[in-house]
Image: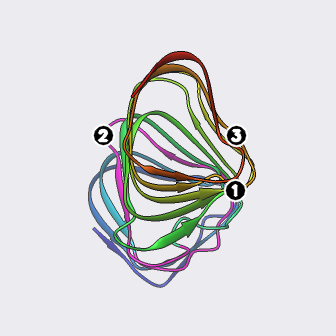
């Protein structure tokens, strides 16, 4: 499926439930994007607002900066949802992972929270308000800049081979971290 031009979805969610999709259209509107199945490539600097929910077997690849819409949009991955940043830089509000894969690029977020499921982060990540792990089986690779915040590990089984940078250290109160 190929979608071109401009698409204003108003107050409706962009719902992707399968197929192989190339979306070069400018996506506007106010209720986010949900991908529950299929493989979708976003190739425009989109302006829609709302949460990006990638779950089930949904897979989204970003081919240009801004593909995930407004930079305050939350990004939530669950149940093996995948976001392949494809070498691009994306900016989002809060990142929450409850099972999923975030790979191959740069992600700037206000917060990173890993709560459950099996999670893989492999890329260059930075945040402004904190990185928290409270559960799940987590593999973190690449580079993460936590700014002036503490890395807070409060649970989970965590394999961290990433270069962790920032100025306030790491606190591990529960879980198993190597």
The spot of residue 128 in percent (x, y) is 72, 55
**Magenta-tinted stretch:** 43-66
Mark number displayed over residue 57: 2
Residue marked by disc 1: 147
Q: Residue at x 47, y 20 (%)?
A: 156
Q: Nearer the viewer, mark 1 or mark 2?
A: 1
Indicate the secondary structure of the residue bearing disc 1. loop
Residue marked by disc 3: 150
Mark number displayed over residue 43: none
The residue nearer to you, when weighing 108 against 149, is: 149
> In the rendered image of this protein, does residue 106 appear above or below residue 59?
below
Nearer-N-terminus badge (3/2): 2
The Cα–Cα distance between marks 3 and 2, rounded to whole angstroms, is 33 Å
Nearer-N-terminus badge (1/2): 2
The quadrant in which the C terminus is found is top left
The spot of residue 113 in percent (x, y) is 60, 36
């Amino acid at each position: 499926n190929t979608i071109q031009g401009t698409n204003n979805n108003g107050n409706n969610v962009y719902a992707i439930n399968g197929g192989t999709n190339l979306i070069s259209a400018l996506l506007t509107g106010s209720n986010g994007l949900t991908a529950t199945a299929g493989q979708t490539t976003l190739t425009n600097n989109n302006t829609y607002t709302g949460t990006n929910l990638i779950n089930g077997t949904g897979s989204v690849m970003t081919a240009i900066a801004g593909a995930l819409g407004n930079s305050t949009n939350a990004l939530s991955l669950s149940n093996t949802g995948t976001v392949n940043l494809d070498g691009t830089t994306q900016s989002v509000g809060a990142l929450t992972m409850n099972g999923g894969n975030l790979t191959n690029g740069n992600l700037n977020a206000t917060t990173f929270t890993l709560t459950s499921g099996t999670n893989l982060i492999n890329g260059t990540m930075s945040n402004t308000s904190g990185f928290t792990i409270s559960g799940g089986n987590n593999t973190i690779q690449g580079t993460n800049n936590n700014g002036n915040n503490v890395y807070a590990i409060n649970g989970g089984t965590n394999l961290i081979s990433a270069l962790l940078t920032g100025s306030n250290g790491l606190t591990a109160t529960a879980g198993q971290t190597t």
